[in-house]
Image (cartoon, grey):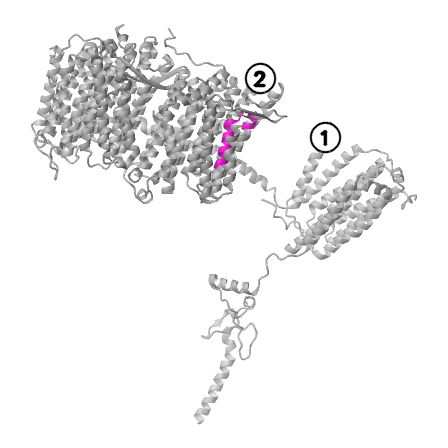
């Protein structure tokens, strides 16, 4: 089978895809939201695939799109969804001068790479046509390599993938950090708390029930007539203070008083 | 083979003890230590009978390192010192369950330490020596860190850092020696080969300094002595006994065997400096001992002073002084053991080693007081005690070469009387104090007496009949003098004079 | 030279081969008593008393043997075994039995036996009696080693051994802080002296390659004058320490804290005279060095005056006797310093002094026994009546020490004064004056103790001591009286070969009347008279009277010897000690800790780089990559 | 086409990846930056494969992809786990690895 170039003219591909890749990569770094970053990266990868193709690496072109862009990047997106799409980063830099230093380091590294790689460069390229042709195509050529000299490494990667899959399952599987407390244990803990801290082991008193009020914000009265603060949720107390028990009782008292008065009258009548 | 067996018996015993528990571990440990002692007596008998016990196997070909063991007079004495002190220490110290690890671990560590020390004294290959020289630090570190005072962990680290720093400097020299020798022919680390080493004076001096620094840290010389008081204060008295009695001897042992044996010219050049350093050690250690408030620290400082004497004797470079030094090494092991162990007995009762916490102990425990006095008298080199013969020969030998130095060093004898007797007076004599009445309720038990007895008996025996020991020390001393190509000063006004 | 003839030792025969038993028996007894402990509580003191008696028996037999020998064969060297052999040095444990050492052995074992017997009574109620006897035996063994040794190294073993025994016995009642301190002081001061002796031995080993008396005697004449003088001075330092001579005198007075038998045996009769023995033994060295000899004589004279001076002002009976001991030993040292002529006199006085001073010390012990252990003479008085035997025996000692004609001290002391007068007139004159002072303070002691009126404290009922105590007193009083007469005609000739002296011409029990002798007698009588005039005619105050007399004040303070030591040695020594401890903790260990702190600080600084942010670590890594890459690139470029 | 263009492009992408890795705090974006760097390396492999006419470079590139896939799987599950535990995906929050 003869190789059909998917893109004609590597230069066209380079000059179109190259700038897009750089822009997309920069965008990936700069986007605040992870989703956008992921999509930018996907863009970079697709463009990279095109450049692979332009360099006669048709197998990698396919793999790059299917595996990388298709699988890996989708995994990223899933995780982004899991972790929270709208989680945006804090803009405050905690490490002093870190951004500037990072950028400087990046520039330094770029210069270093440029110099180092530049010195080792050759101007011309042999091209892989001959190599591809040797076994009858790019895929066949790679296959000959993978199942020939690199077969051990290839097998090792299979083990690696299995391990990774198992590892991912194990890691993602949520596990209790502590054993579940049963009723017995809870009761014991409550008594323990009572013994050591003197906390009342039983349930708290209910809220008060008055003639006109039975809301949970109304405090209960203890037998001696004092207010039981326990009976009202601490949150409610903090928000609006303890309701005045006297005012709550007042209507009932007034009613009793009027009843007494009525009864008194009738006794007098008798 | 006998030497290897001797050195390995305690090691194997230590490993076995590691897996035992309770009282059994202690009994087995003491049994192993006694068996080792018996074996060492056999070794001594064979050696004195003229048998050549040395062993020789190639170990690392590329370096020329050998598994080579051998005995000479000094080595034999050090081996015996080790095999005597270990059972004594095991006997004297009760099973200590208050430590970080179980009591059986301590016994095991002591036995392993014994094995490694024996290797140090037996090795006739410099690399092998260095290996065990450093290896002894491991059990010793854990012995210090595991049992004793509250700040023992700190003390253990200090000990380790000092020793490692010294050992590191020595490593440079060990490598240097090997490399220099290899550049002259087939590589070898054998002592007998290295003695033929031929290097420029400046290189020799550097190599010498490397060895000397390590040994000076070991045999605590001022100013690299500060680890010893701290360690002795925190470690248990038994551990201190092993540390000062055996491990520190490696320092002086090494000076004779390696510094003088391998670098005669450099040693000669360095003599004035080292003699003065030794002198400083003697006086400084003694003065510091007088001023101590803690019994264990005091004993440690007396050792600094005594090691000063030993180093002085070694570098005075006369047969008598070197011989005396070796003799002193042996007896110092016994005398410090007596002191440390008795202080340990006291500490066990009183729960403190501050001098001010005692007073009038004699009234409650005369035997304990008597034992402390005996140890003290050995420490101040009373004639009749072995330590006297050592100190006397060191000073007499030094006098024949450097009268002024010897005269100054001799004042250490007066200071020794002061630090021992002041300590004895403050702790043992006077009216029985309230604290003493409360805590010192029992006198020395039979077991305690039994543990110290061999040490005292040996001190007296070597004091009255030192000749058999001196024959051994003389052998090494004469050999050293031959290697150094140096001869004793001739009596100026003897019969030969005119 | 006749000097050396006597010192060619002959091989031991017969009993001489077991001469070492003299030492071994008491040593063994001491060891048994100490090791067996409480088991021997009931009978230990008898065993211990038998030990010196056995040694005395051996010594007596040997002495008799020597007496029967011709002069040239009286020096027997019984070598036991090789003690130290290293390099070219060989030191044997050997015993030299010669006219000098046998006399010492007799004195030590004889007086020692009596004092053991006395102690049975004196220490009867002491809970530590067994220990006391063990120490006494130890002392006897050490002292015999000292005098019988045939070389200086073994002598030194005995020398330090008696120091140890002295230490143990002075601080025997260790529960008394004063006793413990006194013991320690004695040991330390003695050690200073020992320093001299050890250095002398070092010198001998370096110079002669041996420390045996024979080698030293032979080699001494080859010494350069400087070394000879140095050797002489070093030996003198040793002698000063043991014999409590100025400037190392301060321990002796404090040593009276020990039980009285100890004071009698060790601090009067035997150990303190070891210094004299040492000087006399080293006669060959001193023969080479007039300077060192003169130093010995001067030290002796200064001490004899100082001791007498102290004796005049003390109220403690034992301290008066101690001062007197110092003074008498001063006489011996003076004699030893004069030279060969006076060596026999030094030994002669040593022996007589051993008798009468032991007698008086035991007498003082007997008095104390009767006075509830009170030592203050101001609380005594009129004891002649209740304690008759003690009084009469003490009187014999008194008459002997002041030099009453025909008593023992008369012969020995007068000989010394005469010899000094002849050779060193100035020192002789001073010695003569001191004889007067001796008479003065001893008369004062007699007046305050036995005569005058009673000033007893309440509840004290003086009584005579039991027979076990007074029998030794009587046995010691006899030689105090007659020893002089017996030995005067004989000792010079007997000792001459051993000490290198010349046989004196006038040698008879009848004292030769010389001008100096007469003057001495006059001075003594004057001393007694003055003492009587001062103390005898009016009542003795029971309290220490106030005085402006500078001499008395100085005497009461031991001539400020302790103050001097305190100011010159102790205070700077303590300051030095403190400084060393401070330096050790601050500077030396401080430097160590400082380097530790520095490392920790450096680490603390560097660890802020470990801020926990992965990005930061990443940056560090990238920078590292850049650096490595740069290095590679530059490497390629270059 | 001259291979050096591709090399420069790869270097630029790598540098952007580095900077992104260093400055971003969101663990996911950091991870993406790492992927970017891997990709830039792959580009170099492919380029040099063409330069030398040898398919081994492309094979390496393939291996890199496999490893990257494995790494992404494990890495992302770790991120998920951290997010579960801490409710945050910021790398700055996981800053316990310090003194």
Q: In the visual, does A139 lie left or right of A225?
A: right
* Residue B115 is a magenta residue: yes
Residue drawn at the location 20% of the way across and 8% of the way down: C503
Q: Secondary structure at mark 2?
A: loop
Disc 1 is attached to a residue of which chain?
Answer: C
* Residue B224 is a magenta residue: no
Q: Does the image show residue D9?
A: no
Q: Label 2 to label 1, Cα distance in Å?
A: 41 Å
Q: Which residue is mark 2?
A: B198
Q: Position of residue B385 (x, y in %)?
A: 36, 26
Residue drawn at the location 73% of the way across and 51% of the way down: A165
Q: Which residue is mark 1?
A: C634
The residue range painted magenta reads B110-129
Q: Secondary structure at mark 1?
A: helix
The C terminus of chain B, quarter of image: top left
Please state the total of marks drawn on the protein image: 2
Dominant secondary structure (helix, strand or loop) of the stretch shown in magenta: helix
Question: Above or below — where is B461 with respect to C220?
Answer: below
Q: Which one is in front in this view, the residue at disc 2 or the one at disc 1? A: 2
């Amino acid at each position: 089978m003869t190789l059909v170039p998917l893109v004609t003219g590597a230069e066209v591909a380079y000059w179109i895809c190259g700038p897009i890749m750089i822009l997309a990569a920069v965008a990936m770094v700069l986007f605040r939201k992870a989703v956008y970053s992921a999509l930018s990266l996907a863009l970079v990868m697709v463009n990279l695939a095109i450049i692979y193709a332009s360099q006669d690496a048709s197998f990698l072109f396919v793999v790059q799109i299917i595996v990388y862009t298709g699988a890996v990047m989708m995994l990223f997106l899933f995780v982004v969804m899991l972790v929270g799409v709208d989680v945006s980063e804090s803009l405050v830099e905690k490490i002093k001068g870190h951004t500037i230093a990072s950028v400087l380091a990046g520039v330094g590294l770029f210069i270093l790479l440029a110099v180092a790689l530049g010195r080792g460069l050759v101007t011309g390229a042999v091209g892989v046509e001959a190599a591809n042709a040797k076994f009858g195509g790019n895929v066949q050529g790679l296959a000959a390599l993978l199942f020939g000299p690199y077969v051990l490494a290839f097998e090792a990667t299979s083990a690696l993938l299995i391990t990774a899959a198992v590892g991912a399952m194990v890691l993602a599987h949520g596990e209790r950090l502590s054993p579940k407390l049963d009723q017995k244990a809870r009761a014991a803990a409550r008594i323990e708390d009572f013994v050591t801290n003197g906390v009342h082991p039983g349930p708290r008193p209910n809220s008060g029930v008055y003639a006109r009020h039975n809301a949970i914000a109304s405090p209960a009265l203890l037998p001696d007539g004092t207010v039981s603060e326990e009976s009202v949720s601490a949150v409610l107390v903090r928000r609006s203070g303890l309701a005045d028990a006297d005012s709550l009782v007042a209507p009932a008292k007034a009613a009793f008083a009027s009843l007494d008065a009525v009864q008194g009258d009738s006794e007098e009548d008798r | 083979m006998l030497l290897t067996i001797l050195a390995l018996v305690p090691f194997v015993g230590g490993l076995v003890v590691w897996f035992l528990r309770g009282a059994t571990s202690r009994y087995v440990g003491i049994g192993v230590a006694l068996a080792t002692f018996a074996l060492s007596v056999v070794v001594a008998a064979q050696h004195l009978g003229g048998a050549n016990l040395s062993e020789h196997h190639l170990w690392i070909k590329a370096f020329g390192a050998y598994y080579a063991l051998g005995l000479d007079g000094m080595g034999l004495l050090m081996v015996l010192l080790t095999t005597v002190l270990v059972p004594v220490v095991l006997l004297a110290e009760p099973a200590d369950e208050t430590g970080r690890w179980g009591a059986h671990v301590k016994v095991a560590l002591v036995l392993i330490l014994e094995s490694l020390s024996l290797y140090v004294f037996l090795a006739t290959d410099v690399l092998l020596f260095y290996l065990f020289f450093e290896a002894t630090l491991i059990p010793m570190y854990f012995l210090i860190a595991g049992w004793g005072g509250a700040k023992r962990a700190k003390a253990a680290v200090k000990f380790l850092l000092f020793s490692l720093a010294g050992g590191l400097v020595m490593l440079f020299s060990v490598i240097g020696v090997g490399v220099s020798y290899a550049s002259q022919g087939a590589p070898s680390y054998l002592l007998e080969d290295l003695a033929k080493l031929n290097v420029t004076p400046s290189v020799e001096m550097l190599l010498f300094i490397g060895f000397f620094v390590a040994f000076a840290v070991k045999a605590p010389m001022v100013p690299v002595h500060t680890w010893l008081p701290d360690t002795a204060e925190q470690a248990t008295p038994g551990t201190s006994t092993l540390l000062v009695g055996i491990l520190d001897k490696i320092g002086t042992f090494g000076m004779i065997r390696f510094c003088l044996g391998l670098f005669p010219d450099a040693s000669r050049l360095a003599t004035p400096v080292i003699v003065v350093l030794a002198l400083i050690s003697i006086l400084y250690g003694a003065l510091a001992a007088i001023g101590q408030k803690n019994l264990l620290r005091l004993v440690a400082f007396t050792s600094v002073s005594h090691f000063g004497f030993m180093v002085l004797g070694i570098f005075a470079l006369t047969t008598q002084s070197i011989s005396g030094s070796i003799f002193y090494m042996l007896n110092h092991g016994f005398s410090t053991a007596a002191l440390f162990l008795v202080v340990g007995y006291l500490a066990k009762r009183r729960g403190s080693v501050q001098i001010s916490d005692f007073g009038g102990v004699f009234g409650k425990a005369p035997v304990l007081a008597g034992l402390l006095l005996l140890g003290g008298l050995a420490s101040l080199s009373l004639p009749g005690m072995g330590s006297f013969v050592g100190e006397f020969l060191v000073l007499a030998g030094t006098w024949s070469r450097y009268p002024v130095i010897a005269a100054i060093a001799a004042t250490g004898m007066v200071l020794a009387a002061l630090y021992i007797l002041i300590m004895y007076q403050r702790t043992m004599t006077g009216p029985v104090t309230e604290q003493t009445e409360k805590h010192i309720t029992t006198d020395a038990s039979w077991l305690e007496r039994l543990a110290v007895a061999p040490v005292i008996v040996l001190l007296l025996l070597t004091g009255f009949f030192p000749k058999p020991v001196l024959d051994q020390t003389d052998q090494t001393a004469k050999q050293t003098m031959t290697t150094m190509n140096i001869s004793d000063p001739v009596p100026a006004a003897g019969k030969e004079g005119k | 030279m006749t000097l050396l003839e006597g010192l060619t030792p002959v091989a031991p025969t017969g009993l001489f081969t077991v001469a070492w038993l003299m030492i071994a028996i008491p040593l063994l007894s001491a060891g048994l008593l100490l090791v067996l402990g409480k088991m021997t509580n009931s009978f230990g003191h008898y065993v211990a008393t038998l030990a010196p008696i056995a040694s005395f028996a051996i010594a007596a037999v040997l002495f008799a043997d020597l007496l029967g020998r011709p002069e040239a064969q009286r020096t027997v060297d019984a070598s036991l075994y090789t003690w130290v052999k290293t390099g070219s040095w060989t030191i044997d444990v050997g015993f030299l039995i010669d006219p000098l050492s046998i006399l010492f052995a007799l004195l030590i074992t004889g007086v020692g036996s009596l004092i053991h017997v006395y102690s049975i009574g004196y220490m009867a109620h002491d809970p530590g009696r067994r220990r006391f006897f063990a120490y006494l035996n130890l002392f006897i063994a050490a002292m015999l080693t000292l005098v019988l040794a045939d070389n200086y190294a073994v002598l030194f073993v005995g020398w330090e051994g008696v120091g140890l025994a002295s230490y143990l016995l002075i601080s025997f009642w260790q529960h008394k802080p004063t006793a413990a301190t006194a013991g320690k002081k004695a040991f330390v001061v003695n050690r200073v002296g020992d320093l001299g002796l050890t250095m002398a031995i070092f010198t001998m080993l370096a110079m002669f390659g041996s420390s045996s008396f024979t080698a030293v005697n032979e080699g001494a004449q080859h010494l350069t004058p400087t070394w000879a003088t140095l050797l002489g001075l070093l030996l003198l330092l040793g002698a000063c320490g043991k014999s409590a001579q100025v400037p190392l005198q301060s321990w002796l007075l404090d040593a009276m804290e020990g039980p009285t038998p100890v004071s009698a045996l060790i601090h009067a009769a035997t150990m303190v005279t070891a210094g004299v023995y040492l000087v006399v033994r080293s006669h060959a060295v001193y023969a080479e060095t007039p300077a060192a000899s003169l130093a010995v004589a001067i030290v002796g004279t200064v001490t004899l005056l100082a001791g007498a001076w102290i004796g005049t002002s003390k109220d403690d009976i034992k301290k008066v006797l101690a001062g007197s001991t110092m003074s008498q030993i001063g006489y011996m040292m003076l004699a030893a310093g004069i030279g060969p002529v006076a060596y026999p006199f030094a030994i002669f006085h040593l022996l007589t002094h051993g008798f009468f001073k032991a007698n008086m010390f035991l007498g003082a012990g007997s008095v104390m026994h009767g006075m509830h252990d009170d030592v203050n003479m101001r609380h005594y008085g009129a004891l002649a009546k209740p304690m008759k035997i003690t009084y009469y025996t003490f009187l014999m000692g008194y008459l002997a020490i002041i030099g009453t004609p025909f008593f023992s001290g008369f012969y020995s002391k007068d000989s010394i004064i005469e010899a000094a007068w002849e050779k060193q007139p100035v020192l002789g004159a001073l010695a003569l004056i001191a004889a007067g002072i001796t008479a003065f303070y001893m008369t004062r002691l007699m007046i305050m103790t036995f005569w005058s009126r009673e000033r007893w404290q309440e509840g004290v009922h003086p009584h005579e001591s039991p027979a076990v105590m007074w029998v030794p007193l009587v046995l010691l009083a006899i030689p105090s009286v007659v020893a002089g007469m017996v030995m005067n005609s004989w000792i010079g000739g007997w000792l001459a070969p051993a000490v290198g002296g010349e046989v004196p011409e006038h040698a008879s029990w009848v004292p030769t009347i010389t001008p100096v002798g007469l003057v001495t007698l006059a001075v003594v009588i004057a001393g007694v008279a003055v003492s009587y005039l001062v103390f005898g005619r009016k009542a003795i105050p029971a309290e220490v009277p106030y005085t402006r007399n500078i001499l008395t004040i100085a005497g009461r303070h031991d001539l400020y010897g302790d103050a001097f030591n305190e100011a010159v040695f102790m205070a700077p020594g303590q300051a030095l000690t403190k400084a060393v401890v401070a330096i050790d903790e601050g500077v030396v260990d401080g430097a160590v800790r400082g380097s530790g702190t520095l490392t920790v600080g450096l680490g603390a600084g560097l660890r802020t780089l470990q801020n926990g942010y992965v990005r930061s670590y990443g940056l560090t890594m990238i920078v590292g990559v850049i650096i490595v890459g740069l290095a590679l690139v530059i490497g390629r470029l270059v | 086409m001259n291979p050096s263009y591709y090399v420069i492009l790869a270097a630029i992408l790598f540098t952007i990846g580095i900077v992104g890795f260093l400055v971003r705090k969101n663990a996911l974006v950091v991870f993406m930056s790492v992927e970017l760097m891997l990709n830039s390396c792959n580009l170099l492999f492919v380029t040099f494969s063409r330069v030398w006419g040898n398919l081994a470079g492309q094979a390496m590139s393939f291996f890199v992809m496999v490893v990257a896939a494995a790494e992404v799987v494990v890495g992302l599950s770790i991120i998920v786990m951290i997010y579960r535990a801490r409710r945050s995906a910021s790398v700055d929050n996981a800053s316990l690895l310090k003194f």
